[in-house]
Image: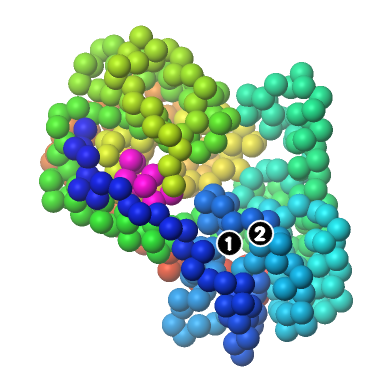
């Protein structure tokens, strides 16, 4: 395991707190095509990837091609007077209500193009029961169905009022095209500037050590929500067998997990950490040698993005992932990571442990993979894709 990195704890301040609503409105006054994103309330997951990162990329282009800004649900009244000058309004995972309906009607009256952005298959009510099964929810609970049908139904109502869509991958785009009223474009998730800068610092520290730890290999599982029990269960038996057979291995679990299941007999070698902000999460990922991303392989999980791969590769950490559509399209070479079906986790873990214990093999791969994701998922690499998806989406 890598010793605790010198960057002991990053002071985290959400970068989107740096601007007032007045400043974000003023950003739309430039004499350029104008695009505004609306999201219900800024958070560290969907908002960061699907709204903040997009605006950051467009604002930092040279020369700048688009006047871009974002707003939250409680700022709709401030946004409405800007509609006559707006070219495109992107509704990112926005649920239907009277205020949103009024905004859409007024945008349409001013001939503003309206696009729907979503990064999960949660905008089509036909899949609610399937989603609950995948997320290991109690399908005997009528109130749970009430909640999820309301959530997905309100998203679907907004999607059906839009002129097109934007999403994270081709598989999810095909599902979205069945709901929205026009073409769907793909802009993948990617690193933002602060995340990339932090990752570069962590990578440099590991590289200075030659990617050598203290002899212990740590396998990390990084869970962003409390609904990944069935995903973790795919790899858990193989992880338990690894801990049993190799005393110089450990497991780090970060985020939500109800139980470590078959790892319980080795609980003294399983570190459980609370959910982290997205900057300090990079540090915890950097401190493990192997990152695992097991998923059930179904229509819902195939809609997920590949962020677990590129967030790990950016800090020189090796990934083993289920071969869903997006992981297959990102881990396209054995030099980038490993793909493991449900019955392949024992072999995949053994191979990965052997790899990271070989400095001569591991170090150059780690550096090459980090360079690869900076090129493919860097914060400033998607200007053309965003412009195409918003201003030329037809």
Q: Name the residue rendered at 23%, 29% in the picture.
A: 217
Instruction: Please identify the dominant SS of the magenta region.
Output: helix
Q: Which residue is mark 2?
A: 39
Q: Dots 1 and 2: beta carbons under 8 Å?
A: yes
Magenta part of the chain = 278-285
Is residue 33 placed above or below 105 in the rendered structure?
below
Please name which of the two marks, 1 or 2, marks the residue nearer to the observer: 2
Q: Is residue 123 above or below residue 89?
A: above
- Mark 1 falls on what kind of element? helix
Give the CA distance from mark 1 to mark 2. Answer: 8 Å
The answer to whether any part of residue 179 appears in the image is: no
**Residue 147 - label:** none
Name which residue lies at 57% across and 77% down.
23
For the rendered model, the colour scheme is rainbow
Which structural element holds mark 2? strand
The foreground one among 298 and 240 is: 240
Q: Position of residue 159 (x, y in %)?
A: 77, 55
| In the rendered image, the vertical position of residue 15 relative to residue 123, given as above or below | below
Q: Residues within 10 Å of mark 1 (few under 14, many from 20)?
A: many
| Residue at the image point whose x is 61% and y is 90% from the top | 31
Give the camera-side residue of 91 and 278: 278
- The quarter holding residue 386 reads bottom right
**Residue 75 x/y as whole percent:** 70, 67
- Split into 4 quadrants, where in the image is the N terminus? top left
- Image position, residue 100 (x, y; %): 80, 61
Q: Is residue 321 left or right of residue 286?
A: right
């Amino acid at each position: 395991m890598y010793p605790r990195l010198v960057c002991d704890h990053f002071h985290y301040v959400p970068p989107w707190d740096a601007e007032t609503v007045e400043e974000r409105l003023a950003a739309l006054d430039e004499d350029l095509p104008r695009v505004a994103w609306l999201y219900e309330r800024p958070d560290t997951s969907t908002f960061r990837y699907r709204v903040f990162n997009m605006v950051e990329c467009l604002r930092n282009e040279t020369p700048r091609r688009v006047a871009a800004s974002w707003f939250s649900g409680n700022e709709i009244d401030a946004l409405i007077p800007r509609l006559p000058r707006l070219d495109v309004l992107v509704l990112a995972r926005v649920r239907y209500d009277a205020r949103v309906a009024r905004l859409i009607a007024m945008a349409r009256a001013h001939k503003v193009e309206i696009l729907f952005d979503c990064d999960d298959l949660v905008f089509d009510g036909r899949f609610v029961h399937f989603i609950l099964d995948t997320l290991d929810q109690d399908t005997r609970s009528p109130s749970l169905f009430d909640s999820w049908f309301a959530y997905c139904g309100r998203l679907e109502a907004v999607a059906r009022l839009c002129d097109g869509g934007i999403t994270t991958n081709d598989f999810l785009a095909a599902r979205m095209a069945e709901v929205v009223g026009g073409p769907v474009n793909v802009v993948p998730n990617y690193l933002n500037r602060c995340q990339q800068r932090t990752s570069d610092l962590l990578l440099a520290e590991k590289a200075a050590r030659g990617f050598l730890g203290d002899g212990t290999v740590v396998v990390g599982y990084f869970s962003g929500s409390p609904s990944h029990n069935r995903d973790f269960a795919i790899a858990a038996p193989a992880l338990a067998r690894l801990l049993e057979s190799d005393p110089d291995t450990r497991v780090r679990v970060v985020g939500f997990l109800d139980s470590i299941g078959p790892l319980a007999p080795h609980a003294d070698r399983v570190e459980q950490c609370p959910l982290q902000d997205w900057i300090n999460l990079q540090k915890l990922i950097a401190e493990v040698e192997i990152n695992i991303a097991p998923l059930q392989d179904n229509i819902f999980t195939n809609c997920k993005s590949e962020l677990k791969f590129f967030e790990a590769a950016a800090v020189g950490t090796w990934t083993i992932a289920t071969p869903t559509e997006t992981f297959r399209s990102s881990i396209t070479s054995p030099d980038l990571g490993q793909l493991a079906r449900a019955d392949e986790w024992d072999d995949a873990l053994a191979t990965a442990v052997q790899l990271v214990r070989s400095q001569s093999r591991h170090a150059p791969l780690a550096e090459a993979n980090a360079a690869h994701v900076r090129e493919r998922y860097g914060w400033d690499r998607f200007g053309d894709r965003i412009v195409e998806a918003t201003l030329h989406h037809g």
